[in-house]
Image: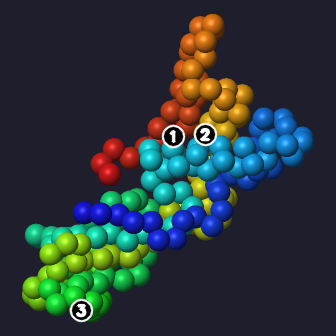
């Protein structure tokens, strides 16, 4: 299995203005720094909770799954745009969508009863491609509020603490607040 991001989020779950309000910064000198911290915080949260803002991915498989179920390894499935395979001659084919069902809540593609996957000999490496879209939605307000707050806390923490370690002080983890905010949304089975 191999995943490739095709269309990244068009916006971040929190805006630069929201981050500046959280940190109480009124100048524009650090706007680029804050924008990079917002993106980094989003990526960290996505590694724990899955895609936030709508994004498109390709999932590649080496063979058709036994049991007729293709598990989509990202939560909040919105659509399956295409299911294609490449035969051993290098010719790409689109699987007829009458063969399968899309289980959005279950994040999977399920072969219909009595149907079977195409029997063509497959290309040896990554011949099956599932293009799908996932995330809470296209707008920052589609993302759960506690996730947005966790991102703001991370951005503020990283802005104030620009080094990976803190020397000379008692070290206490600030991320407990972030962990608590994300706990309901963490992914354990993905």
Relative to 71, residue 179 above or below: above
Q: Is residue 189 left or right of residue 139?
A: left
Q: Can residue 4 be seen at all in this image of the molecule? A: yes
Position in image of residue 189 (x %, y %): 30, 48
- The residue mark sitting in front, 1 or 3, is 3
Instruction: Find out whether the residues at labels 1 and 3 contact each other: C-beta distance under 8 Å.
Output: no
Q: Is residue 106 left or right of residue 180?
A: left
Q: Is residue 112 left or right of residue 56?
A: left
Residue placed at 33% from the left, 60% from the top?
73
Circle 1 packing at 10 Å, graded few (<14), some (14-19), many (20+), is many
For the residue pair 19 and 125, the one nearer the viewer reads as 125
In 3D space, how far apart are the residues under numbered discs 1 and 2 (Cα atoms)? 7 Å
In front of the other: label 3 or label 2? 3
* Figure quadrant of residue 121: bottom left
- Name the residue carrying label 2: 150
Whichever of labels 1 and 3 marks the residue nearer the N terminus, that label is 3
Residue at the spot 64% in from the left edge and 55% down from the top edge: 13
Front residue of 153/5: it is: 5
Q: Which residue is mark 3?
A: 91
């Amino acid at each position: 299995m191999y995943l490739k991001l095709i269309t990244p989020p068009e916006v971040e779950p929190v805006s630069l203005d929201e981050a500046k309000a959280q940190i109480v910064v009124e100048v524009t000198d650090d706007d680029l720094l804050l924008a990079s911290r917002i993106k980094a915080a989003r990526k960290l949260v996505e590694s724990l909770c899955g895609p936030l803002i709508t994004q498109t991915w390709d999932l590649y498989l080496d063979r058709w799954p036994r049991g007729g179920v293709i598990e989509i390894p990202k939560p909040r499935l919105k659509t399956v745009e295409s299911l294609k395979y490449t035969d051993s001659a290098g010719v790409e084919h689109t699987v007829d969508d009458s063969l399968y069902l899309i289980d959005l809540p279950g994040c999977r593609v399920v072969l219909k009863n009595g149907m079977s996957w195409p029997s063509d000999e497959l290309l040896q490496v990554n011949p099956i491609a599932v293009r799908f879209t996932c995330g809470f939605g296209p707008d920052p307000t589609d993302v759960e509020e506690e996730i947005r707050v966790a991102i703001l806390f991370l951005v503020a923490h990283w802005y104030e603490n620009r080094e990976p370690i803190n020397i000379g002080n008692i070290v206490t983890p600030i991320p407990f607040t972030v962990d608590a905010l994300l706990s309901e949304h963490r992914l354990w089975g993905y």
